[in-house]
Amino acid sequence: MTLTPDEFVNGIFSLIFALISVVIGITIISKYPKSKNRTILLVGIVWLGIVSSWYASSSSFLVALITDGDGYMSAPPYYFIIGVVPLPITAFIWMIAFTDFLYKKNQKTILLIFGIIGIVFEIAFFSILFIDHTKIGEVTSPVDAEYEFFVTAYQLFLVVMVLITGLLFARESLKSKSPEIRLKGKLLIAAFISFVLGSVLEILSGFSIIILIVARLILISSSIEFYGGFMLPKWMERLLLREN
C-alpha cells in the first residue's frame, strides 16, 4: 500500500514528535541518579508515557514504510495496545508526582481513586479488545485511528486532568522569589497549555494537513517547554531570563 502525501507528512511529524519526546523523557530520567529527586524520575517517565498515542502512529508508519504495507491497519490491536494501554499507568505515576508536591495529606486517597479508575479502564479495555476490537476503534490509515466513545472519553478526562493539575503544579513555582524557579513555572504553564492545544488541534486535523502540521509543531514545543520547566538547561536560562 502506497502512503498518500498527507499520510507521509502525518507519519513523519508523528515520528519526529515521538523521537523528541523519548529523548526528553530519557534525558530527564538520567538526572535522577545524581539528584536523587523522585519527582525528576517520575516526570521523566510521565513524559515517555503521555505521548503513547504518537508511538502507535509513528510505529505503524514505520511498519508501513518498511513493508510497503498498511502498517497496523491489518492488525488494529497492536495500534490500540501501544496507543492506549500506557495512559492509565502514566496518569497514576503523574498523580504520585503531583501529590508529592501538592495535597500530600490526601495522597493516599487521590492515588486510590486514580488507581481504581485505571484498573477498571484497563480491564474493560482488554475485555472489549479481545471480544470485538472494533468497539475500541478503527485504524483508518497506516498513521491514524478513530477511537470509539469509551477510549475518547477517557482521553478527554486525562487531557482535562493534565491541564488542571499541571497548572496547579506550575502555579506554586510562580510564587517563588527565585527568577529561575519562576521561569520554570512559566515554562510548565506553556508546556501544559501547548500539549492540550496541540492535542485538540490534532483532533481537528482531519480538516486540513496544515492544521496537522501546526498541531505537531505545538506538541513539539510542549516537549521542549516541559523539559525546560523541570530541568532549565543553562542555554535556555540565558536565552529566556533577562537580568534587569
Image: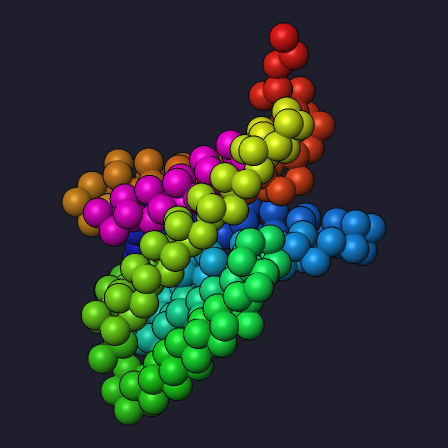
Task: Residue 190: tell me if it is visible.
Answer: yes
Q: Position of residue 123 (x, y in %)?
A: 39, 86
Magenta segment includes 201: yes
Quarter of the image with the C terminus in it: top right
Report the residue that reaches farthest toward the top.
244
Q: Quadrant of residue 215?
A: top left
Q: Position of residue 5 (x, y in %)?
A: 29, 45
Report the residue that reaches farthest toward the bottom.
131
Q: Position of residue 41 (x, y in %)?
A: 67, 57
Q: Position of residue 142 (x, y in %)?
A: 33, 62
Task: Residue 118: tell me if it is visible.
Answer: no
Q: Which residues are magenta?
A: 185-204
Report the residue that reaches farthest toward the left.
207
Q: Residue at x 67, y 20 (%)?
A: 238
94 horizontally vs 82: left or right: right
Q: Quadrant of residue 141?
A: bottom left
Q: Residue at x 54, y 58 (%)?
A: 103
81 horizontally vs 181: left or right: left
Say above or below: 226 vs 242: below
Magenta span dominant secondary structure? helix
Magenta segment includes 218: no
